[in-house]
Image (cartoon, helix red, strand yellow):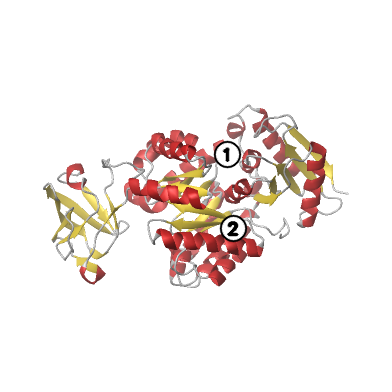
């Protein structure tokens, strides 16, 4: 374990793919700073993902690291079908059709995988392809065809995304394929599941009911990438365990100029209630092909951290890029430089402080104030549910938050929370023994030395799980 003085608090999520699949690269990603590995079920096969899952677990054990694994479900994503030579060129002003009939495409039409599309759009509707790079305008529809004019042309490839901003598609956010993949993930033991194209709280509740019936606890992350999700943001965050600012599709669903404000809003809402938030998409897009980032990307990373992101996510950079390890190192380096700025360690405003009046919320805030005033080396939080550590994380203290749990799932879930170092502790200890063992673990991991002050947060021996009601300060001897 590195010293608290040079350890980064912002967590890094890496998407695993062809570039990062080899065992040696996987271990180098962990050593470079990866905290959570993302397996994107929109691409690849379940067999490949399960193989990657096993390799991540093996690599984490080999390096003695706690690494969470996130299953990202595809959701009701509309995609284009097969094309000759895998791509065609669309020319502005020409006609092009989207068809629900199964057939090889050509330079005049392509199949889409959503049969309800002709019923959901009308004349004048704008349709975007290929991450918003190509634009069509609907001229007329038939039961199986959407006839369009190309507004912005370019190269269309197979299996590219189709977005229809401002139109509520008649499709469930949680599809039968999502259900199949989720059951597979629950059986394998994924730590997090990300739900794509969430529109309302009911979408999350539906998934929660399924995980409950399977007797499995999994950390549910709502991906905010639809305009309807912004309208229902507070309700969605309330029923989710965390959220993701999915800037790719969000930047097509709403005007591009509104994405920065939407990002700040999502991060702020998650920070207020102490739920982790991931900022994603094109963090280091240039490093897919180049060994160094642009100045704009570095600034984007820093601003996402300063706004309150718990974690930053790399997609193509680590999945299929030429410099996966280098991208993680850059992210880690920029995060470290940003976190050292004084602004990062300020206590929240009075508005944020007054949101909750429960004992645990106030103790978490006081622990941060106490740690700052006394120059405490760490804030130690033995936890059964992870809640205590996440409440403290919400206030962004300068001191690292050491969360000690006997539950391996809780340890891995905390790998997504800003400033939290999850460590293992034995189960069933008395309160006095718990404190003594916590001190021993802090010493063994090089987190404290003799004379260092430590702020302890915990629940009394007879309190319920998740109920923090004790705080004490000790000087290590």
Q: Going by the image, does 113 lie left or right of 320?
A: left
- Residue position for label 1: 274
The local secondary structure at tag 2 comes to helix
* Residue 397 locus on image (x, y percent): 67, 45
Name which quarter of the figure residue 170 lies in: top left
Q: Which mark is residue 376?
A: none
Name the spot of residue 68 as percent of width and height, x first. 56, 53
Tell me which residue sits at (52%, 42%) in the image.
Answer: 216
The single residue placed furthest to the top in the displayed view is 357
Is residue 54 something one can see in this rendering? yes
Disc 1 is placed on an element classified as loop
Which quadrant of the figure contains the N terminus?
bottom right
Q: Is residue 296 above or below residue 347?
A: below
Mark 2 Cα-neighbour bin, 10 Å: few <14, some 14–19, many ≥20:
many
Q: CA distance from mark 2 to mark 1?
A: 20 Å
Q: Nearer the N terminus, badge 2 or badge 1? A: 1
Read off the residue under disc 2: 335
Q: Whole-percent x and y of residue 279?
A: 49, 51
Q: Is residue 254 visible?
A: no
């Amino acid at each position: 374990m590195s010293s608290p003085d040079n350890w980064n608090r912002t967590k890094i999520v890496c998407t695993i793919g062809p570039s990062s699949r080899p065992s040696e690269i996987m271990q180098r990603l962990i050593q470079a700073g990866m905290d959570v590995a993302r397996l994107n079920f929109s691409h690849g096969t379940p067999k490949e993902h399960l193989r990657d899952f096993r390799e991540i677990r093996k690599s984490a054990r080999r390096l003695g690291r706690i690494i969470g694994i996130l299953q990202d479900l595809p959701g009701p994503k509309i995609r284009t079908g097969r094309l000759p030579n895998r791509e065609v060129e669309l020319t502005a002003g020409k006609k092009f059709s989207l068809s629900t009939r199964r057939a090889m495409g050509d330079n005049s039409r392509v199949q889409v995988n959503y049969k309800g599309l002709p019923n959901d759009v009308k004349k004048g509707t704008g349709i975007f392809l290929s991450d918003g790079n190509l634009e069509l305008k609907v001229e007329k529809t038939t039961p199986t065809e959407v006839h369009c004019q190309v507004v912005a042309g370019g190269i269309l490839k197979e299996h590219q995304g189709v977005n229809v901003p401002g139109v509520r598609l008649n499709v469930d956010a949680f599809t039968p394929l999502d259900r199949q993949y989720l059951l597979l993930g629950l059986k394998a033991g994924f730590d997090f599941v990300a739900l794509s194209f969430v529109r309302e709280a009911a979408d999350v509740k539906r998934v929660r009911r399924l995980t409950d019936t399977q007797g499995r606890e999994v950390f549910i992350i709502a991906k905010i990438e639809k305009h309807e999700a912004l309208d229902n943001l507070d309700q969605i965050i309330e029923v989710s365990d965390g959220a993701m600012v999915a800037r790719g599709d969000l930047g097509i669903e709403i005007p591009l100029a509104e994405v920065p404000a939407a990002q700040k809003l999502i991060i702020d809402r998650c920070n207020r209630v102490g739920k982790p938030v991931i900022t994603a998409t094109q963090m280091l897009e240039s490093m897919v092909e180049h060994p160094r980032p642009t100045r704009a990307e570095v600034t984007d990373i820093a601003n996402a951290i300063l706004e309150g992101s718990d974690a930053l996510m790399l997609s193509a950079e680590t999945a299929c890029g030429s410099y996966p390890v280098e991208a993680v190192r850059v992210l880690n380096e920029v995060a470290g430089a940003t976190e050292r700025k004084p602004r990062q360690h300020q206590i929240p405003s009075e508005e944020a402080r007054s949101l909750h009046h429960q004992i645990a919320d106030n103790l978490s805030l006081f622990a941060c104030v106490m740690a700052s005033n006394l120059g405490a080396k760490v804030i130690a939080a033995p936890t059964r549910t992870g809640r205590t550590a996440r409440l403290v994380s919400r206030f962004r203290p300068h001191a690292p938050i050491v969360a000690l749990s006997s539950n391996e799932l809780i340890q891995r879930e905390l790998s997504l929370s800003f400033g939290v170092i999850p460590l293992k502790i034995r189960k069933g200890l008395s309160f006095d023994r718990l404190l003594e063992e916590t001190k021993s673990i802090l010493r063994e991991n090089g987190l404290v030395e003799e004379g260092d002050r430590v702020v302890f947060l915990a629940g009394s021996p007879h309190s319920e799980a998740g109920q923090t009601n004790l705080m004490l300060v000790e000087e290590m001897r």
